Image (cartoon, grey):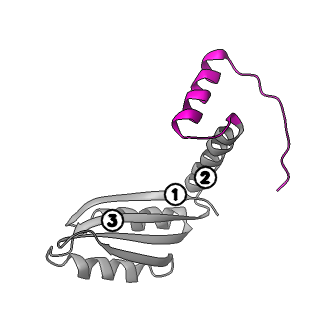
Amino acid sequence: MTVVRFGVSLEKGLLDALDKFAEENHFKNRSQALRHLISNNLTEKKWESNEIVAGAVSLVYDHHKRDLLSNLADLQHDFHDVILSNIHFHIDHDNCLEIIAIKGESSRLKELANRLIGLKGIQQGKLTTSSI
């Protein structure tokens, strides 16, 4: 990928905020911080426009909860067309972490994530968005 250099003029307060953002997020320079911010903004636009995107749904749950594993499996089978893969980790004797990689139209991915996170017994859930 070709890198093009250009000049940017910013108010002092905005530049200070950019420098603070870069430092807090361990970017080596302002260019990396700007690339990150622009990329995230474009990804958000793709998710808002119902384009084909990718992401991951992370779930934490107690696998002993009644009917939860069956409901998780049923829901994932209902959305088999957008699920790329999943991985299951045992956090401790009772709790599990499941990460589900997804790809498809953003509206369908949001629906899947909301339905998964909303299942009775899910302790924590998060949709992480990405573009392709």
The residue carrying mark 1 is: 129
**Residue in the foreground of this view, choosing between 19 and 10:** 19
The amino acid beneath tag 1 is Thr
The magenta stretch spans residue 15: yes
* Callout 3–callout 1 Cβ contact below 8 Å: no
| Highlighted magenta segment, given as a residue range | 1-30
* Callout 3–callout 2 Cβ contact below 8 Å: no
Distance from disc 3 to disc 1, alpha carbons, whole Å, reads: 15 Å
Determine whether the residue tagged by mark 1 lies in a helix, strand or loop.
strand
Q: Earlier in the sequence, mark 2 or mark 1?
A: 2
As displayed, is residue 109 above or below residue 86?
above
The magenta stretch spans residue 64: no
The amino acid beneath tag 2 is Thr
Distance from disc 3 to disc 2, alpha carbons, whole Å, reads: 22 Å
Q: Residue 67 lies in what quarter of the image?
A: bottom left
The residue carrying mark 2 is: 43
The residue carrying mark 3 is: 59
User: Could you tell me which residue is drawn at 66 percent across and 43 percent down?
Assistant: 38
The amino acid beneath tag 3 is Leu
User: Could you tell me which residue is drawn at 71 percent across and 38 percent down?
Assistant: 31
Q: Position of residue 52 (x, y in %)?
A: 61, 66
On-image quarter of the C terminus:
bottom right
* Callout 2–callout 1 Cβ contact below 8 Å: yes
Determine whether the residue tagged by mark 2 lies in a helix, strand or loop.
helix
**Residue in the foreground of this view, choosing between 129 and 13:** 13
